[in-house]
Amino acid sequence: MEDLRSSRACCGLVPTAPTEDALRTIFVLTGRGDEVSTSVLARHLGVSPPTVSIMLKRLAEHGLVERTDHRATLTPHGAGHARHVVRRHRLLETFLVRVVGLAPHEVHDEADALEHAVSDRLLDRIDALLDRPTHDPHGDPIPRSGDAHVEGWGTRLADAAVGGEFRVERVQDWDAAALAHLDDLGVVPGLTLVVLERGPGGPLWVRFDGRDHALGESLTRLVHGREVHVDVLA
């Protein structure tokens, strides 16, 4: 994948850690179908809304985002830059789990710090060392050169039909504590569970590994996948 950080020739942008974080965050939120407003970006990036507004104005001036009604969308060129950051982030997360031995809930912030410094030459060596993985430890697909990249977030567990089987494909990694809890329970990519019951205003009951578990809505909204069988309990 071409190194788009050397972007002065293509759009004049001098990349920085904050702008790359903003591009990656917009890319991920858009892929999930979430709102990409100034306030949402500010919350995810840990900065103030005015700071986000200034950042988005700069990205818009370089043709990377479009802004309407306090919301941001990536232009095709901006999406190219964002995919490059996402590739670095997800490959580094995979390296930190497989080689360094960190737990999946520990790697997001570490990869965030490293992704702005790693060269493409080193990243390609990491990619080869890992045998060119297609997904990171959270189930997120890793963009690569020549691919028509698809994020494919699928269905949230929170929206899965009661009485059916649900296969976990991805787990959001931005909440380390929640991710650690789900990992301890065994709710990880590749797990197939049965959706038992959804109480009004209460937890979602699921069954896997011969046990029933109650998951709050804040957790079930972090888990994405697909329904593989419906009404298995009927």
Image (tube, helix red, strand yellow):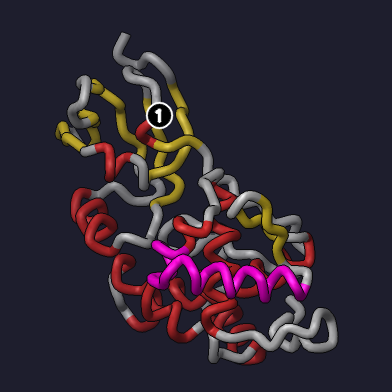
Location of residue 118 (image quadrant):
bottom right
* Position of residue 64 measured from the top left corner of the image (x, y, whole percent): 73, 68
Residue 72 visible somewhere in the drawing: yes
Between 123 and 99, the one lying in front of the other is 123
* Position of residue 173 measured from the top left corner of the image (x, y, whole percent): 38, 60
* Position of residue 121 measured from the top left corner of the image (x, y, whole percent): 66, 91
Task: Examine the rendered structure and indicate whether residue 186 appears above or below residue 232.
Answer: below
Location of residue 165 (image quadrant):
top left
> Can you say which quadrant of the picture contains the N terminus?
bottom right
Q: Residue furthest right?
A: 9
Side of 207 relative to 85 (left or right): left
Tell me which residue sits at (42%, 18%) in the image.
Answer: 230
* Position of residue 46 measured from the top left corner of the image (x, y, whole percent): 38, 71
- Taking the magenta stretch, the answer to whether it contains residue 48 is yes
Between 202 and 228, the one lying in front of the other is 202
Location of residue 172 (image quadrant):
bottom left
Between 208 and 63, the one lying in front of the other is 63
SS type, badge 1: helix
Task: Examine the rendered structure and indicate whether residue 74 appears above or below residue 98.
Answer: above
Tell me which residue sits at (47%, 86%) in the image.
Answer: 114
Residue 87 visible somewhere in the drawing: no
Side of 190 relative to 52 (left or right): left
Side of 42 relative to 104 (left or right): right
- Taking the magenta stretch, the answer to whether it contains residue 181 is no
Task: Examine the rendered structure and indicate whether residue 149 appears above or below residue 103.
Answer: above
Please report the bounds of the magenta region as a residue range.
Answer: 42-62
| Prevailing secondary structure of the magenta residues | helix
Disc 1: which residue: 159
Q: Say how many tags the image has.
A: 1
Are there few (<14), some (14-19), or many (20+) residues within 10 Å of tag 1?
few
> Can you say which quadrant of the picture contains the C terminus?
top left
Q: Amino acid at mark 1?
A: Asp
